[in-house]
Image (cartoon, rainbow, N blue to C red):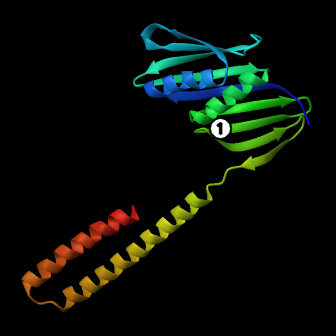
């Protein structure tokens, strides 16, 4: 099995609420990673994570933006303990990231979106191939189903308008024609909304 040489986080982004920020700190305690939390000006926080052996550290700076803490991270990790803790954190706290797992002969590129792996690429010196790509099959089926429901509803509104036009052509009383015109106006508005 190939040995991973390093893991790079490229533009990894975490957005945490106050409660999630506290959970984030506790999360790394559970991962047995040394940490220091520093409160900076404007309520920003810096979290320094260090593997137990003290061989590697990463600094996460969380900027306070309204009611969220936002961290954008670019780093390179070598030691497995800290690397695994970061991977779990990105997943558990619904982060977005491009993660390059570097091996001697190739690099695996993981694209995380909202904490889930959406795409995995394998790159060598000369080529790139897709290893995995998330397909939202259920979502696609739901969208098709909804679009067909709307088409069906549009068809029903067209039928109702045709019936109302037939009634209007047969009507001779002004009050009856006015009532039909009002219903035609409602159906036309409904049709306009559905077609939009």
Relative to 181, 196 lies left or right: right
Question: Residue at 69% of width from left, 38% of height from top?
Answer: 111
- The image position of residue 55, as x and y in percent, is 77, 11
* SS of the residue under disc 1: strand
Q: Which residue is mark 1?
A: 112
Q: Is residue 97 above or below residue 78?
A: below
Instruction: Quadrant for the N terminus, please.
Output: top right
Q: Is residue 11 above or below residue 56?
A: below
- The image position of residue 147, as x and y in percent, is 48, 66
- The image position of residue 152, as x and y in percent, is 43, 75
Question: Residue at 87% of width from left, 40% of height from top?
Answer: 127
Taking depth in this image into account, of 79 and 106 the one nearest to the observer is 79
Relative to 99, 136 lies left or right: left
* Quarter of the figure with residue 59: top right
| Residue 17 visible from this viewpoint | no
Instruction: Quadrant for the C terminus, please.
Output: bottom left
| Residue 54 visible from this viewpoint | yes
Taking depth in this image into account, of 160 and 25 the one nearest to the observer is 25
Relative to 191, 143 lies left or right: right
Question: Residue at 60% of width from left, 38% of height from top?
Answer: 115
């Amino acid at each position: 099995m190939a040995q991973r040489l390093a893991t790079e986080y490229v533009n990894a982004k975490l957005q945490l609420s106050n409660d999630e920020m506290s959970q984030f700190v506790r999360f790394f305690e559970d991962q047995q990673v040394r940490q220091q939390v520093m409160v900076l000006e404007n309520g920003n926080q810096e979290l320094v994570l260090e593997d137990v052996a003290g061989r590697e550290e990463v600094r996460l700076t969380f900027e306070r933006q309204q009611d969220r803490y936002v961290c954008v991270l670019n780093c390179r990790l070598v030691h497995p303990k800290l690397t695994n803790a970061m991977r779990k954190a990105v997943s558990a706290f619904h982060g977005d990231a491009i993660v390059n797992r570097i091996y001697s002969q190739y690099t695996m590129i993981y694209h995380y979106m909202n904490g889930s792996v959406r795409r995995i690429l394998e790159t060598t010196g000369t080529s790139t191939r897709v290893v995995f790509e998330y397909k939202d099959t259920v979502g696609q089926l739901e969208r098709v189903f909804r679009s067909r429901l709307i088409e069906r509803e549009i068809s029903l509104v067209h039928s109702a308008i045709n019936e109302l036009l037939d009634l209007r052509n047969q009507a001779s009383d002004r009050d009856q024609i006015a009532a039909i015109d009002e219903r035609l106006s409602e159906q036309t508005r409904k049709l306009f909304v559905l077609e939009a």
